[in-house]
Amino acid sequence: MKRREFIIKSVTAGATVGLTTLPLFNIIGASKKSTTSVKYDLVAIRGGEPDVMFNRAIQSLGGLSNFVKPNQTVVIKPNIGWDVVPERAANTNPILIKEIVKQCYGAGAKEVFVFDHTCDEWSRCYSNSGIKSAAESAGATVVPGNYEKYYQKVDIPKGINMKDAKVHELILDSDVFINVPILKHHGGAQLSLGMKNLMGVVWDRQYWHRNNLHQCIADFVTWRKPHLTVIDGYLSLKRNGPRGVSTDDVITMKTQIISADIVAADAAAAKFFGEEPEKIGHIKIAGAMKSGVINLDKLSIDRIKL
Amino acid sequence: MNLNKLRTVRIIISNIILFLTTLLFVELSGNYTVSFSDYVLFPQFIPSLLSFLHNPAFIASGFIIILVLTVLFGRIYCSFVCPLGIMMDLILFVRKKYYKFSTRKKFRFTFIKSYNLIRYSILSATFLLLFTGVSTLIVLLDPYSVFGRLITNFIRPVFIGINNLLVAFLEMLGSYSVSPHILYLPDFWVLSIPFVFLIIILFFTLKNGRLYCNTICPVGALLGLISNFQIFKISIDDINCAACGVCETQCKAGCIDSGNKSIDLTRCVACYDCLDSCPTEAISINTKQPVKVLKSNLKTKVKGRRSFLISAGLLTGTAIKTIYGQGDTIKVYKDSTIPEKRTSPISPPGSISIEHFISNCTACTLCVSVCPTGVLQPSFIEYGIEGLLMPHMSNKIGFCNFECTICGDVCPNDAILPLKNENKKITQIGKVKFIKENCVVYTQKTDCGACAEHCPTKAVKMELDAELNLRVPIITEELCVGCGACEHACPTKPFKSIYVDGNPVHQIAEKPKDEKLEIIEEEDFPF
């Protein structure tokens, strides 16, 4: 906490270029309900390019300006876990990330950060995934996530197996948190979707694996949910996930799901993958812990075909 | 040619070589130096020799050029090329300036006798052992490798420290433009050997200039022997010499006996400082027999203490093995109970076999410095005493990046041969082993999959166990490349549930095979 306070002080002293005016008050706890009235809880879209689909789908939620206000800082958390090329569908589509960054700035964001705590060596993941260059070309600041110094301890009071975790400072310090996973198979968690993607904002993942992976994934979203979850289902890794072995494991689905409810987004994505949400441990637990809605019949969904 | 320029040429060339060589070891910005490391290290004597013995190719012919230069001009290697020697010159330069600053007098060297018995004993022991296949002495004493270890262990950490301070500073300004670096400190015994060398080198250098090069260094001794027959010799012209003794005070090798107007060519390191210093220009380079050559027949006193200290240090070191601890609090998880059974250390991909590796590696640790994941770490006695300090794969610290071939690209000795990307991906450096009794899926009855998640070839795969109704790791050794990702990711402690046991001789892994997925065209929404 000390260092962060120091940053705040130096910011207010006017000695800064980057991180500014940190509204520490509204980030811990659930995301704020949007003020603009929106008809839909979730948008599912298929049949277009990643950027085109995002562009269209976000309109149904009132546009990105409904989530990103002028002068706010935004953190985007894609999946950049692996040192593989975009065609392997182990990482989020770089074109989608670029589009989201662009629209954040379009909505008046002051600064947009992109990071992931990668599994493979991070600088290779960042460059070979295409995400670093894509995000930077749209003006984002790409930040490393593989150093413990960036992580600060937070309490997870509602967690059952996990009562605390060390979380990347950008998640703590940014005004808006956008979670952008890719829809893929996962050997351990069955599917890697929105909630699973949040393992990349904490330092010690081995703890999760040791102490009931599904429960820990569900525990973490009780601490904080992203303001928006965009699930990239353009390409999907259907087997050998989360890393995959070759492009033989990949299918082209051309889908995308957007929702402020991370659990609902995961439930819809599971259906796209051909699984029932109740059969995926962490989705079922998160539903039971009332972190979100897994019964899609209860949601107002905009289904768009391009 | 104006001989006075030789010293300037030497200073320029040597500083370029020192700069570039150091850069290879300390570069932090992402392996940009890999592309030219072959050229920078081309003239390094022992790496080139070892590489040539393995594969007589032009790229490994640097030592031949050095030998030719030595026959022509003497120990050019020692002052122009050897990074350890150039580093000593730098230390001497600083000392000279400091001496002048503090005493307002010029620093003076004097002629010293040569310790031929030590020198040639070390030389013959080193090469006899080398040609009988034991490289321990050459590993310890190759000056380039000694230099490499000093840089890796003592200078690179300074650069990382400065880098991380810069990161901290920029972060206060809200900028993430520089990335931090993690410093993996080798354990005590690994560090102790370069530390002892640091002390020895500082002591010798500050006491008597290039005394280390003329007493301990086997390359210096070998090139010194050859220098006896050099064609263009440095000599003192008896007629022009005013016997002022200035040259002797400038000779960091202590090989000029101005009283006898003679130069011991076996110890002259070809720095050409004397050429510059002579007020009467009596020192020159020519093919004539010098007036008097000091035959190294002075009675030498055996001072075996230093070598004794080194060997004693090694012997005590062998008795101790390091143990590591881990420290986060455990809540639900219970500790694993069965230790891993490791039959062999893991040598890096491209090293063919442990036998090939330890007979070619001189533990310069350049691969350790450039390894992007930190998986390559200096060993202590994991390979046995003959593999002392040589790098091994430490899956505790990292795992071998599937796409990366940098260690083989930089290795100057051909201890790690360069591998093409597609060959690297089927080179099996070890095989995966699974300990069911430690695995959280079995002990905790919960999903995990950290191992299979990281496996690039699916040598570890999660498959449904009907009894547990959970996915358990299933291993296929034939697919395993031994990268260690599964072991690194496995969350059980203190013992891993999955680990890689090294292949003493590397093998070829099977290529992963899977049918291409059928694309099912869907247009509707499943909800």
Image: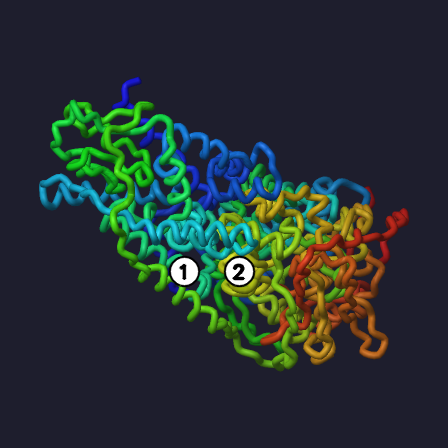
Q: Nearer the viewer, residue A135 or A56?
A: A135
| Mark linked to residue B193 | 1
The image shows residue B84, relative to residue B466, as above or below, that is above
- Would you name the residue on which mark 2 appears? B386
How many discs mark residues in the rendered view? Answer: 2
Q: Quadrant of residue B188?
A: bottom left
Chain containing the residue with disc 1: B
Q: Nearer the viewer, residue B116 or A119?
A: B116
Q: Nearer the viewer, residue A244 or A130?
A: A244
| Mark linked to residue B514 | none
- Residue A65 visible in image: no
Seen from this angle, which residue lies furthest left? B104
Across and down, in percent, residue B195 comes to 36, 59
Q: Nearer the viewer, mark 2 or mark 1?
A: 2
| Residue visible at 69% across and 57% down in the picture | B505
The secondary structure type at the circle numbered 1 is helix
Q: Quadrant of residue B6?
A: top left
Across and down, in percent, residue A44 comes to 77, 52
Figure quadrant of the N terminus of chain A: bottom left
The image shows residue B398, relative to residue B321, as above or below, that is above
N-terminal-most mark, 2 or 1: 1
| Residue visible at 71% across and 64% down in the picture | B432
